[in-house]
Structures are given as structure tokens and as C-alpha cells.
Image (cartoon, grey):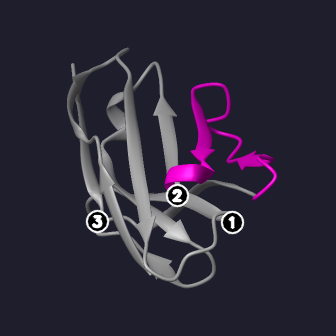
Amino acid sequence: VQLQASGGGLVQTGGSLRLSCVASGSVRSDNTMGWYRQAAGEEREWLGYILGDGHTNIEASIKGRFTISRDKASNTVYLQMNDLKLEDTATYYCHYYPAFWGQGTLVTVSS
């Protein structure tokens, strides 16, 4: 399984970004996929996941600002991030459960 994340970049506080992650290789379109992030000097933080049926579970502190969705046809999972804050600055990783990780995409939020 290979995961290619994209969509990171520099954004001002209050702005939005949508991250994408395409899974390829020996993948199942209904496999659980998720997102994590890691800020400099911090541990990797779980953000949420999406099941094959589309049900999502989002970490409480970001719920309402971040949403996860997927397109099974293209094996793509998305992380929509709204009202971004300085503390959202991190490298964001997608995760193909249970054990595969993307390379990360950097999100920098500036004031």
C-alpha cells in the first residue's frame, strides 16, 4: 500500500485547506483511513478516521472545524480544515489502517 498526501501549504489564520491522500497498490476501497498530525517537537496526534460506510470519528478538539470524507472510486480520503489556527501548524499524515502511512504534507498557519 502506498499513500500520497497533498494539499498542504501556507495559509493565514481563519483560512481553509483541503488535504488529499490517494491510496494505491493492494488497497481496499472500504478500508478505514484516517489522519494524524505532528507538530515540531510534539508527538503524533490522532485527528480522526473514516470507515468504509462513510461514518467518521473526529477528535473532539477539532470537531466542527475539520471534517473527513472519502471517494471510494479513487481511493482518496480528504481532510477539510476550516478556521485554521496557529496551533494547527504541523505535518499531516494519512493512515491506511492498520499499518500504512503517507509521507506527510506540511501545513503552516501564519498570522
| Residue 15 vertical placement versus 90 (above, below) | above
Amino acid, disc 3: Gly
* Marks 2 and 3 in Cβ contact (< 8 Å): no
Where is mark 2, residue-wise? 75
* Marks 1 and 2 in Cβ contact (< 8 Å): no
In the visual, does 34 lie left or right of 42?
right
Amino acid, disc 2: Asn
Q: Earlier in the sequence, mark 1 or mark 2?
A: 1
**Foreground pick, 23 / 37:** 23
Where is mark 3, residue-wise? 41
* Marks 3 and 1 in Cβ contact (< 8 Å): no
Answer few, some or many: residues within 10 Å of disc 1's Cα (few below 14, many 20 plus, some between 14 and 19). some
Q: Is residue 67 magenta?
A: yes
Q: Is residue 22 magenta?
A: no
**Stretch of the chain drawn in magenta:** 52-75
Answer few, some or many: residues within 10 Å of disc 2's Cα (few below 14, many 20 plus, some between 14 and 19). some
Residue 108 in the image, given as x and y percentages of width and height: 22, 38
| Residue 93 vertical placement versus 76 (above, below) | below
Which residue is painted at 68% across and 69% down in the image? 31
The local secondary structure at tag 1 comes to loop
Which residue is painted at 69% across and 45% down in the image? 58
Where is mark 1, residue-wise? 32
